[in-house]
Image (cartoon, grey):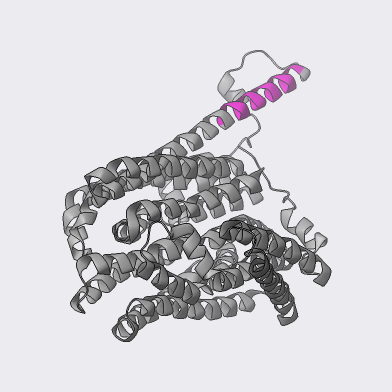
Amino acid sequence: MLALCSVVSKILGASFRIPLTNILGAEGMGIYQIVFPLYAVLLTLSSGGLPVAISRVVATRCAKNQSDSSGKILCVALIAMTIIGFLITLIVLIFHRAIATVQGNHLASLAYLGIAPAIVFVAVIGVFRGYFQGKQNLLPSSISQLVEQATKLIVGISLSINFMQYGVEFAVLGAVLGVTLSEAVAMIVLILFFIFGFISQKKSRLTQSVATHFDMEVSLDWNIDEFANSDKPLQTKTESVKSILKTVYKVAMPVSIGALILPMTQVVDSIIVINFLISGGASRAVATAQYGIVNGPVSSLINLPVVMTMAIAIALLPKVTDAFTRGEDTHDIVSTAMRQGLLLAMPAFIATLLYAQDIMHLLYGSGLSATELSQGVQILQISAVIILYATIVQLCTAVLQGYNQAAKPAYILAMGAVVKIATTVLLLYFLGIYGVAIATVIFYIIAVILNIYAVRKKMNISIFAKDIFKIFIASLVSILTGLLVKLIVQNYLPNFAALAVAIFISIALYLYLCILLGCILKEEYKIFTKKTNSTVKV
């Protein structure tokens, strides 16, 4: 159930930009993508590494049998993050026009007005998701993500279609209003989960306490509060608000810095790319459209498999934290996660590389011109390897955060970001918009090398060259077989049907080859899905 919700919600989220591109076109997606890098930066400032920090702190307390203090951690974090979220929202509402102008297209200012309230909602969401993940209760997060993505898809697409008659900037406004509403709905879902869980827990404790007291024939001079908390130790050290904030932010700050690097790099990209292309002779509309192709259609297709592997990284963090806190070996957990990530990422990378033209024409043929489609295909082929690199980076990041080394991924991303900005400027001059894609690939190559080095200093991960080679062979053979099938059946079937048959055969053959070559091991799956002893539900 959890896996299904997670996969469906992430597919919905990554798929949102596909119909949106066909509605807004390349220029509209360019405007949409101008807004989101800065929006991501502001979200990081308002909630930042909070989900990771709270998840880790709560998981640590549960491992030490101090789960009662997690409620206070939640309350303190909620108050602090709500205040910060409101302040950042106010800043965006005041300076929205100036921000859009600096980024190269003043039409984006309207979208900033629509997206600003979402910052408060996401700040609250981050606190609750971190809390539930720390308790290793992933159901609330999974359900809220599913509801969030479904709302964004339905409302965002509907509003953008209806607003398109007023101009492309209003269509973009409709899309971001869908995002804002979806965050509000997700926040409400998480709050309801917490309320019902809290009431259920209190009733359970009260029933337990009453039964215990009657069995012991204790005097009836009691009150409800005593029974509701009767399972707590008689003497507990009250933790101050300052102490809680210090503990949370000690973990959150390095994670927040790391989380800021990618969106900050994208903000710099939005300023450099559009203004650089305009200075090179392109019109504002063409420059915005080219920027939109890189960060709209291409980015959506790259992110689709990456967000699916992200679910592995999210599940990995509390498990590594729990094992590390208890002094247990994390080798099997991490190695299995790495293997599973590669099992998803490798075929996705090869399929994106070889099917780039079919994918672009099938999904974006009605929204992009022939020239834009041609550019999109070439950029997608250049960017395909990012699927593999990004998967490795996010898994390594989860491991390092679980080992209380959250600062290392931040430093690694910072070094990569500096190189990316420099190479973007250089390659834009020689290769135009294609240079942006190449610079991003270089960024991920640096991040992968440094992350693997950092993880291997902590532990010896048993993902050997022969295992990677097996996964590569299984992926390549199955996808090439699918391509061959497509060439044969496309003479008898429409292109979409021929592609569907090829994909189905590729997936079936890939699973068979993975089992045959020993890439999928039943024992490893049991190790990774096994619940830890400290699992506590709310």
Quadrant where the C terminus is found in the figure? top right
Rendered view: 193 above or below 13: above
Task: Judge left or right: residue 497 versus residue 147.
Answer: right
Q: Quadrant of residue 206?
A: top right
Q: Residue at x 56, y 30 (%)?
A: 198
Q: Nearer the viewer, residue 193 or 348?
A: 348
Quadrant where the N terminus is found in the figure? top right
Res. 80 visible in picture: no
Rendered view: 99 above or below 451: above
Res. 265 visible in picture: yes
- Residue 86, x across and y down, in percent: 29, 44
Q: Nearer the viewer, residue 427 or 492?
A: 492
Q: What secondary structure predominates along the stretch shown in magenta? A: helix
- Residue 277, x across and y down, in percent: 24, 75
Q: Residue at x 28, y 58 (%)?
A: 31
Q: Residue furthest top?
A: 220
Q: Nearer the viewer, residue 366 or 89?
A: 366
What is the span of residues highlighted in magenta in the rendered image?
198-214
- Residue 211, x across and y down, in percent: 73, 20
- Residue 148, x across and y down, in percent: 47, 42
Q: Nearer the viewer, residue 119 or 254?
A: 119
Query: Does 206 lie within the magenta span?
Result: yes
Task: Judge left or right: residue 346 versus residue 47.
Answer: right
Q: How many marks?
A: 0
Q: Residue at x 38, y 67 (%)?
A: 370
Q: Residue furthest front?
A: 492
Task: Judge left or right: residue 523 versus residue 210.
Answer: right
